[in-house]
């Protein structure tokens, strides 16, 4: 009876060429499922041989016989995806998952199907569940930051995967405007494909990618930014300078900066320039000395020592800063600082940077004209900095520690100090980010004066604590609103300790 | 009369029930009597299959499951107490179980109970001994030294040592499963071109990219831009784009103007 029913089903289905084996007709209760699975096996075999039409007939017939079979649902979904019927493939995969087929590879398949259907957000969710390098690469191309973090590891693991990962990551970097990084990665993909004799298609696509990049302007990228802020500062100067202890004033700041970055092979060069000017908005003559103007120039060279352009990077940084007060009537000081910086990606989400910088400082305001004076504050020294950054899609945490040592040209004002701090930046929504941080720094100056007479008073120490809480809201592309509160307390000898609170609000524009 | 009774009893003796159907294979897969198996072959209760060197096969398990067997492996399909039993004699097998009925998975004297919705890789090699990695879902394990069932969840693995207590499942241990998933992907028909599509999407991203625009847009969260006004009082930020320039510094010359 079952055999007759089966024959009737077979007669009515379109799987004409999908014949059952001669010993297949059985009278057991599981016969329909058994025959369906045998047909599905024929479908798989046809798929292996590239006969997609026969594969489709067999798998559809099998699905007709055993519509509840999750195995057949999945296999038919794969075939329909290959044939471009993504909507039906999605329905079948969801049915298979509902039926208990929950291995991560089903999630990878669903991610692919959803990406083909343009359902990006849902596809990224499936990428997370898939936990495979292939799915991660799909996630990268869909713009998922977590997939990007995970895929960076592939570059160093294996030549074939490294080449493919570099190629996909290059496209993703390019889509975010990171041209230099994109060129580096595309060149790496081409290099790996050439050196290891990989599938020539990878090399060809890499070359094509590089050509397309070159047509779009090559590996030079730049940016401009402008900021205009007003702030309300309480106790802006020293207690000793103040006629009362609750000073407050409003101040405006205008800043402009520009960045330029280019790649010469694997070498990355960047330059930056910045200028800013403050304007005290109340009782200006009295506070001219805290009304600052400054400009800064910087150069940076980076060369990746690892295969991954962001794996282990050796860099050299050089910066020059010149600060004035009172509308450029008074020079506060000049600083030239530079040295090697080593940057290492510890995990896909964690980066460590270490720098050893030498510095030359020339103080204008308050320093004796004679540089050989014992009170001269012109100085040279070193700064060592260690920074650890952890990034997630919506959050970034950064810890920084540093040590400073400076020899003053004169007998006084040598400096030894150090500090540490941390910052958390969280992207609450695509438009809104909040940030918070704290910093503690200690400095010891001296000896200032003759230690024979002054004893321990000849040394001056300062402990500086700073807390920051703020947020940024994107008003339009490139334009954002910033609100922030900064609290600073400096514990120092009498007359030099102070507390400051600044409420800041303003606009920032970037292009 | 006796002959008739004997004949009837022989007719009434049920053939072993079918438990699996070979779906796809590469390399040599042989059955109980050493006969080569082709896709569509039915495996009945009590039968054993063997995967030769460099072979791989995928079987559909009745009523609902997918079993993969890898090179140099022996797997027997059994039925006991109404449960389907997979007995891994040697090598590696991977079960993805759907449907509603649990399956028993034995390796030596260690017994596993696999729950529907679970995916588990079981290995029993001379060098490594019995071990298992759960990809998703959950399984329960009972060993000769530990009769109580131990639950092992997705993402955990456990290595068993002869005569020793099984210990606690360890998080991780998924590298082998990932490796075998790769092998199945590459050698069994039915893989989707995820990587090819990723490359295609990636190149489309390049064509639509805002090249020539500001890279800082992508670094919207960079705190380098959070405060410009403080920079005048400080040494330049050490990491222009990574470390907030708002941090501490000891350049307090303006303040020490006595």
Image (cartoon, coloured by chain):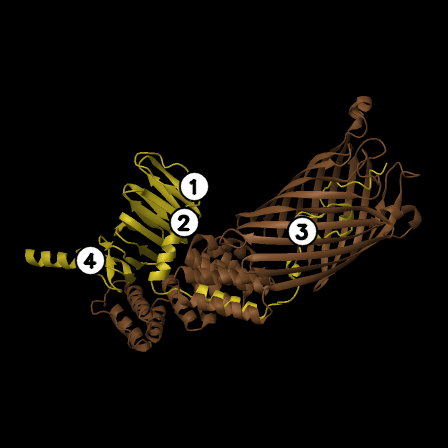
Of residues B227 and A5, the one drawn nearer to the viewer in this rendering = B227
Q: Colour of chain B?
A: yellow
| Label 4 sits on residue | B15
Image quadrant where residue A447 sits: top right
Q: Earlier in the sequence, mark 4 or mark 1?
A: 4
Left or right position of A45 against A249: left
Q: Which residue is mark 1?
A: B170
* Chain A visual colour: brown
**x 48%, y 71%: residue:** A87
- Is A73 above or below relative to A325? below
* Helix, strand or loop under label 2: helix
Q: Does label 1 or label 3 sit earlier along the sequence?
A: 1
Please give the residue where the numbered disc 3 appears in the rendered image. Answer: B240
- Could you tell me how far apart the alpha carbons at marks 4 and 2 are, in whole angstroms? 41 Å
- Foreground residue, A306 or A139? A306
Using the image, tell me which numbered label, if any, was put on residue A57.
Answer: none
Chain containing the residue with disc 3 = B
Q: CA distance from mark 2 to mark 1?
A: 13 Å
Instruction: Indicate which disc residue B175 carries.
Output: 2
Q: Nearer the viewer, residue B252 or B52?
A: B252
Residue at point 23%, 65% (across, down): A26
């Amino acid at each position: 009876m079952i055999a007759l029913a089966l024959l009737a089903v077979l007669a009515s289905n379109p799987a004409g060429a999908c014949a059952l084996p001669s010993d297949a007709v059985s009278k057991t209760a599981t016969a329909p499922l058994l025959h369906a699975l045998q047909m599905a096996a024929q479908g798989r075999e046809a798929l292996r041989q590239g006969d997609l039409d026969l594969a489709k007939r067999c798998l559809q017939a099998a699905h007709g016989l055993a519509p509840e079979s999750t195995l057949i649902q999945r296999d038919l979904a794969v075939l329909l995806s290959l044939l471009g019927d993504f909507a039906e493939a999605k329905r079948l995969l969801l049915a298979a998952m509902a039926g208990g087929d929950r291995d991560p590879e089903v999630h990878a398949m669903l991610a692919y199907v959803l990406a083909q259907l343009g359902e990006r957000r849902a596809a990224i969710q499936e990428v997370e569940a898939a936990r495979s390098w292939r799915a991660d690469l799909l996630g990268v191309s869909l713009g998922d930051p977590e997939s990007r973090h995970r895929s960076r590891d592939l570059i160093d693991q294996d030549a074939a995967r490294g080449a493919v990962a570099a190629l996909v990551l290059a496209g993703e970097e390019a889509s975010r405007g990171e041209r230099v990084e994109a060129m580096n990665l595309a060149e790496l993909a081409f290099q790996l494909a050439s050196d290891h004799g990989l599938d020539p298609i990878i090399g060809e696509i890499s070359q094509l990618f590089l050509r397309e990049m070159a047509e779009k302007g090559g590996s030079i990228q730049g940016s401009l930014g402008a900021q205009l802020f007003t702030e309300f500062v309480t106790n802006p100067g020293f207690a000793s300078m103040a006629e009362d202890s609750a000073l407050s004033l409003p101040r405006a700041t205008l800043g402009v900066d520009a960045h330029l970055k280019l790649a010469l092979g694997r070498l990355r060069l960047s330059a930056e320039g910045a200028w800013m000017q403050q304007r005290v908005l109340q009782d200006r003559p009295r506070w001219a000395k805290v009304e600052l103007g400054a400009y800064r120039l910087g150069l940076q060279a980076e060369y990746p020592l690892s295969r991954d352009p962001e794996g282990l990077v050796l860099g050299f940084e050089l910066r020059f800063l010149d600060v004035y007060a009172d509308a450029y009537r008074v020079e506060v000081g000049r600083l030239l600082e530079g040295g090697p910086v080593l940057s290492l990606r510890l995990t896909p989400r964690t980066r460590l940077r270490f720098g050893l910088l030498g510095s030359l400082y020339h103080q204008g305001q308050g320093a004796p004209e004679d540089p050989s004076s014992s009170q001269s504050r012109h100085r040279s020294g070193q700064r060592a900095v260690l920074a650890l950054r952890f990034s997630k899609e919506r959050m970034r945490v950064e810890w920084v520690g540093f040590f400073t040592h400076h020899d003053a040209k004169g007998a006084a004002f040598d400096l030894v100090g150090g500090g540490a701090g941390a910052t958390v930046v969280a992207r609450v929504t695509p438009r809104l980010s909040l940030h918070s941080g704290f910093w503690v720094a200690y400095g010891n100056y001296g000896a200032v004066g003759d230690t024979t007479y002054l004893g321990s008073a000849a040394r001056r120490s300062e402990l500086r604590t700073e807390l920051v809480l703020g947020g940024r809201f994107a008003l339009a592309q490139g334009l954002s609103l910033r609100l922030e509160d900064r609290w600073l307390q400096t514990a120092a000898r009498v007359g030099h300790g102070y507390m400051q609170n600044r409420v800041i609000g303003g606009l920032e524009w970037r292009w | 009369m006796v002959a008739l009774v004997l004949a009837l009893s022989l007719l009434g003796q049920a053939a072993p029930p079918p438990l699996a159907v070979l779906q796809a294979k590469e390399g040599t897969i042989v059955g109980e009597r050493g006969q080569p198996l082709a896709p569509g072959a039915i495996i009945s209760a009590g039968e054993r299959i063997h995967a030769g060197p460099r072979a791989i096969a995928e079987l559909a398990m009745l009523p609902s499951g997918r079993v993969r067997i890898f090179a140099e492996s022996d797997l027997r399909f059994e039925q006991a107490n109404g449960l389907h039993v997979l007995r891994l004699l040697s090598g590696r097998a991977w079960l993805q179980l759907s449907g509603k009925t649990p399956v028993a998975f034995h390796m030596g004297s260690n017994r596993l109970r696999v729950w529907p919705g679970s995916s588990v890789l079981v290995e029993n090699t001379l060098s490594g001994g019995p071990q298992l990695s759960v990809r998703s879902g959950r399984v329960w394990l009972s060993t000769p030294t530990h009769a109580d069932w131990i639950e092992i969840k997705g993402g955990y693995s456990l290595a068993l040592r002869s005569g020793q207590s099984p210990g606690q499942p360890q998080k991780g241990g998924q590298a082998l499963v990932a490796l075998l998933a790769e092998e199945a992907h590459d050698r069994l028909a039915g893989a989707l071109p995820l990587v090819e599509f990723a490359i295609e999407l990636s190149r489309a991203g390049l064509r639509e990219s805002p090249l020539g625009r500001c890279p800082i847009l992508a670094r919207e969260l960079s705190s380098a831009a959070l405060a410009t006004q403080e920079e005048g009082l400080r040494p330049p930020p050490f990491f222009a784009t990574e470390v907030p320039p708002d941090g501490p510094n000891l350049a307090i010359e303006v303040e020490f103007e006595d």
